[in-house]
Each structure stands twice: as C-alpha cells, then as structure tokens.
Amino acid sequence: MESSMQASSFDLSSLSQCFLNRIQELKQLTHLMTDGKQSQSQKDLLGMEASVRALEDHILEMRNYVRRESNAIPKAEALLQACKIQSHDITRLSALSSSLQPSQPVRSTSAVPVLNDVSNMHRPDMTDLEKPKRDKSVPRWHVTPAEFETVSGYLKGRISLEKVNIAVDELAGHAEVNMRLLNLLKHSSSKLAGADRKRAAELMNIAATKEGLKGRYWLPETDLRDGATLKLDKSSKAILIMLRQLGRLQEVRCTIAGSTGAVYILHPSP
C-alpha cells in the first residue's frame, strides 16, 4: 500500500513537472511571438513612413508644377494674342497686296527738259493734294525744322523733330491702309477677308455719317491702339496737339461702332 502511494506521488510529481516545463515552453513561445510581431510591426511602420514621405515629395512636386504652369498662363495668353494680331496683319496685308500697283520707273534726269522760266511751271492746287487717288499712296507732309521751332517748349518737352515726322509717316500709313480698304470694298469686295471686310464696312459707315471726310486722307482714333510711335498715351497726345497747331492734322468727333470717338484728317503744310 505504501509503495503504491509512493508511486502515485512520483507520478503526480512527474506530471506536475511536465506541466511546469510545458508552461515554461509556452511562455518562451509567447515571448518569441511577441518579439516577432513587434519587429514586424516596426518594419511595417518604417515602410509606411517611407511611403508617406515619398507621397509628400510627390505632392510638393505637383504643387510646384501647378504653380509654374499658372505663372506661365499670362505669358502664353500674351503670346497667343500677339500671334492673333500678327496673323490678322498678315491677312490684311495679303488682301491689300493685290491692289498695289507697281511703282513707276524713275526717269533719267537727262530726259527731263530744262525749264528756264520757273514761274511758268504748273503749281498743283492744294485741294488736289488733299484728294486721294486710287493708285497713289498718301503723301507724307513732314514738319520742317523752322515749323518745329515755333512750337512752345512746354509742349515739345523731350519730343524731337524726328519723332514728330515718324508720327506723320505712321498717320499716313494708317490713312493709306484705310483708303485701300475702302477702294477694295467698293470695287473688289470679294478679295477682302472677313475681318478686313468688317473693318472696311466700319470705315464706310464713318465716311457716310460724317461730312468732310470724302476726298480726304483720314483715320479713326482706334487705329492708334496698335501704333508703334503714336499710341493713346501722354506723349502721343502731345504730338497730336503739336500737329494740330502746325496745321497737319484736324480732329473731328463722330460715332464709331456705337460710341463717340475722334477722327483725324491729314492736311498738307499751310
């Protein structure tokens, strides 16, 4: 009986020891699993942090790209507007080139008879000079140095005689383009492009509604918006006032495209 109790006690001790060993193994396995999960979680966190940083860099790059493109939009619009103006000018010149006549060859001075009596030379009437002819360009009535000296100093300012005469050439160029547009509208309207036909119709309406323009060289104030020397600024207004005082220019008011505007009529030297 005693021996059986000892055997039972040994079996319980062995079983208890086995349980303790198993529990210790389970604890070790639990620690290992916890350490592995922590290590894996740390790796995952590092990977996520790298992805977030890469995403932030990408967003920053996109933001800089949008900023650069936004800053380039006004330049692109200005360039597009300049291309439209250049295309319009090319179309306009192409339509007008068909109406240009070849210039007359210059005659040799040896073929010109010598006139001893200058008083017998024919002097053209000033009114004839003011009337435009279809195949002739608009004359350039330049300001002489003597005339320029009569202008007051406060009006001249920094304006030179050369700049004034460049403005005279520019005004005559505008008037010549308008004259050719009107001639094309009257005789060869099919050669005019859409924009030029609309422009010629506006000029025709101005000439029809304002007396005193027929048979004259003239241009509306709106032509000065695209000018190189004359623009709608203080310096250009001073030049226009100077030319009016010198009798080269006359300003009249009329209705242009539904609003009141100025029309400039060119005059020869008085």
Image: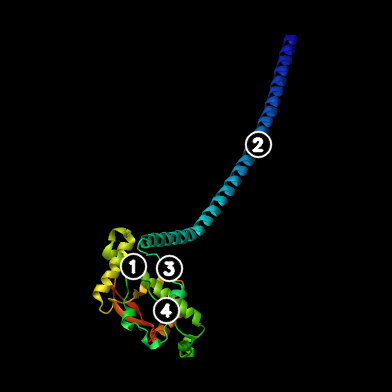
Using the numbered discs, state the Cα–Cα distance from disc 4 to disc 2 in whole angstroms. Answer: 116 Å
Q: Nearer the viewer, mark 1 or mark 4?
A: 4
70 left or right of 262?
right
The label shown at residue 180 is 1
Q: Mark 4 vs mark 2: which is more N-terminal?
A: 2
- In this rendering, would 49 be left or right of 99? right
Is tag 1's residue or tag 4's residue first in the polypeptide sequence? 4
Q: Is residue 180 visible?
A: yes
Residue indicated by mark 4: 113
Query: Quick one: label 1, few (<14), some, or many (20+) residues within 10 Å?
Result: many
Per the image, label 2 sits on a secondary structure element best described as: helix
| Horizontal side, residue 170 vs residue 46: left or right | left
Q: Tell me the SS state at disc 4.
A: loop
- The amino acid type of the residue labelled 3 equals Pro
In the rendered image of this protein, does residue 72 appear above or below residue 227?
above
In the picture of the structure, the residue carrying the numbered disc 3 is 105
Q: Amino acid at mark 4?
A: Pro
Three-letter amino acid code of the residue under disc 2: Gln
Residue situated in front as seen by the camera: 145 or 54: 145
> Which residue is the site of mark 2?
38
Q: Residues within 10 Å of mark 4 (few under 14, many from 20)?
A: few
Q: Considering the numbered disc 3 on the image, is that residue within a helix, a strand or a loop?
A: loop
Rounded to the nearest whole Å, what is the CA distance between mark 3 and mark 2? 100 Å
Q: Is residue 194 above or below residue 104?
A: above
Q: Is residue 233 something that shows in the picture?
A: no
Residue 199 occupies quadrant: bottom left
For the point 42% across and 78% down, the residue is 113
Circles 1 and 2, Cβ within 8 Å, touching? The answer is no
